[in-house]
Structure formats: C-alpha cells, structure tokens
Image: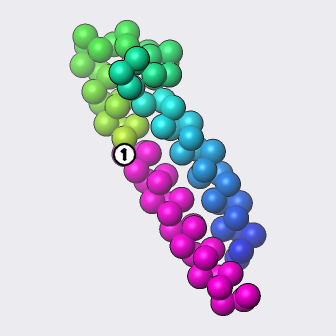
Amino acid sequence: MVTFLSILLSLTSILLIVLVLLHKGKGGGLSTMFGGGVSSSLGGSAVVEKNLDRLTIVCGLIWAVCIIALGLLLKQTG
C-alpha cells in the first residue's frame, strides 16, 4: 500500500506541476502555446480555463490525500 501511494504521489506531483504551468497568468503562461490565446475571442478559452482549474483542483486533492495517507501509514509502521 505504501508503494502504491508513493507512486501515486509522484505521478500527481508531476501532473500538478504541469497543470500549474499551463494556467494563464499575467504573461499568458504556457496555455497560450496550446491555443488558449488564439481562441480567446471565440469564448472557448473560458471553458478550457475552467476545465483546467477543475483538473488542477482534483489533482491537488488527490496529492493531499496521498500525503496524509502516507503519513498515517508510516506513523503506524514506524
């Protein structure tokens, strides 16, 4: 179980880094590279940003649950 949670924590950490970098910031971020800035006049980028926000939140919650679960498991075994 600890191995599974460690692997899941590593994967969600990498995914969370990528998702945060994809967000549109003051300078446009990396999301403009994938068409976020081109379709802004069509209104499609708002949907993309909303879905990116949701995916980032879900990934962050999974990351936090993995950390708490690993902490509890390692406290019991240690």
Tally the numbered discs.
1
- Against 74, residue 13 (above or below) is above
Is 29 left, or right, of 74 in this rendering? Answer: left
Amino acid, disc 1: Arg
Q: Secondary structure at mark 1?
A: helix
**Start and end of the magenta stretch?**
54-78
Can you give x and y, in whole percent of width and height, for residue 25 in the image?
38, 25
**Residue picked out by circle 1:** 54
Can you give x and y, in whole percent of width and height, for residue 69 in the image?
57, 75
Work out whether residue 68 or residue 2 is closer to the camera in this orientation and state it: 68
- Against 59, residue 21 (above or below) is above
Can you give x and y, in whole percent of width and height, for residue 73 in the image?
64, 82
Residue drawn 56% across the image and 41% down it: 17
Work out whether residue 19 or residue 74 is closer to the camera in this orientation and state it: 74
**Quarter of image, res 66:** bottom right
Picture quarter with the N terminus: bottom right
Is 66 left, or right, of 20 in this rendering? Answer: right
- Against 58, residue 52 (above or below) is above
Is 47 left, or right, of 10 in this rendering? Answer: left
Residue drawn 50% across the image and 15% down it: 33
Residue 63, magenta (yes or no): yes
Residue drawn 63% across the image and 59% down it: 9
Is 75 left, or right, of 23 in this rendering? Answer: right
